[in-house]
Amino acid sequence: MATASVPGVQTYTVVASNANGTSVPASVDVKWQLPPPPPVCKQIVVTANSDLPVLGSRALLTASCDDTPTRFNWTGCQSASAMCYASASVAGVQTYSVSATNIGGTGAPANVDINWQTSPAPPPGFCSQFASFLYSDYGWNSNAIASRDFPDDPGFAWNGVWVVKLSVPGNATATIPGNVSAFEFDGPATSREMTISRTPCDFRPVDPTGNNGPLSDTTGLGPSKGIVVGASTGTKVGLAPGSDYFVNVRNWDPQGAFFTCDPAVRCNAEVAVTLPR
């Protein structure tokens, strides 16, 4: 077994011998490279059946880490992968953390606080108007989360809403637009309605100011919308630094006024966010 302490090309040579003599040498060049940097975990996305999880339920924690981790190290829940299912037996704030490891070592961890409730809190925004809502706090990071990964009922129900919270930092700047999209994942092709609003579960008529309705409303098999930091431009929705926004997705055809997901079939979706940069 060969090792090296510095990067670069190293030549290795071998000869073989037996009773008849020694062979001609055979050589090989091996190019050694520096190991990758340790992975840094930037954020933990929390997904649950409410914005404030209740004792006796679970929350899905999804780590967002760079530099290709090979192992994840969780504190507060048990998992070796990028996803961990958390629960609590005592109400109040509990902190969860994760770090990631690759051949270059273990990098800085990410932390998240979950405020566990003894009983369900009042639904935020307009979510009380719907049968249920799945809630994911994406923070401010490019992420792609599949509802299939949160199997606890009701989850993203056929007649419910999936709310994804985006929190824009006060110092956020960008010159290249980002994008938000919702599409089918591991299920039948399903048309959906997707809004971007300052309010959870907001499917009112569009209001470009965002004061009395969502900033945008997109429908189809894969609704998608461009986003920018600052003022809206062209067809792209502007997100103000220091503000929270909500991507609201439901299995609904607003033109025909009918649900697009068969109650007997689980219509799993994925919500993907690419941040402006």
Image: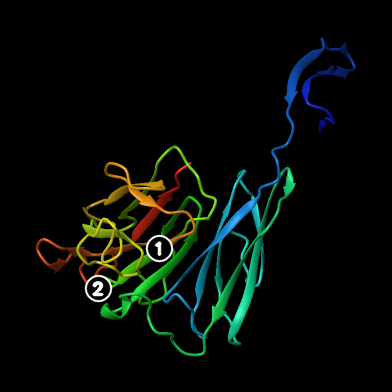
- Badge 1 or badge 2: first in the primary sequence: 2
Residue name at image x 48 percent, y 50 percent = 142
Asked whether 29 or 214 is in front, the reply is 214
Which type of secondary structure does the marked residue at label 1 adopt? strand
User: Is residue 82 placed above or below 162 in the rendered structure?
Assistant: above
CB-based contact (under 8 Å), mark 1 and mark 2 = no
Disc 2: CA contacts within 10 A as few (<14), some (14-19) or many (>=20): some
Residue name at image x 36 percent, y 50 percent = 238
Residue 9 x %, y % = 77, 19
Left or right: where 205 falls relative to 169: left
As drawn, the residue found furthest toward the left would be 256
Residue 71 x %, y % = 65, 54
The CA distance from mark 1 to mark 2 is: 17 Å
As drawn, the residue found furthest toward the top would be 24
- Numbered-mark total: 2
Q: Amino acid at mark 2?
A: Asn
Left or right: where 169 falls relative to 121: right
The N terminus, quarter of image? top right
Q: Which residue is mark 2?
A: 159
Q: Which residue is mark 1?
A: 164
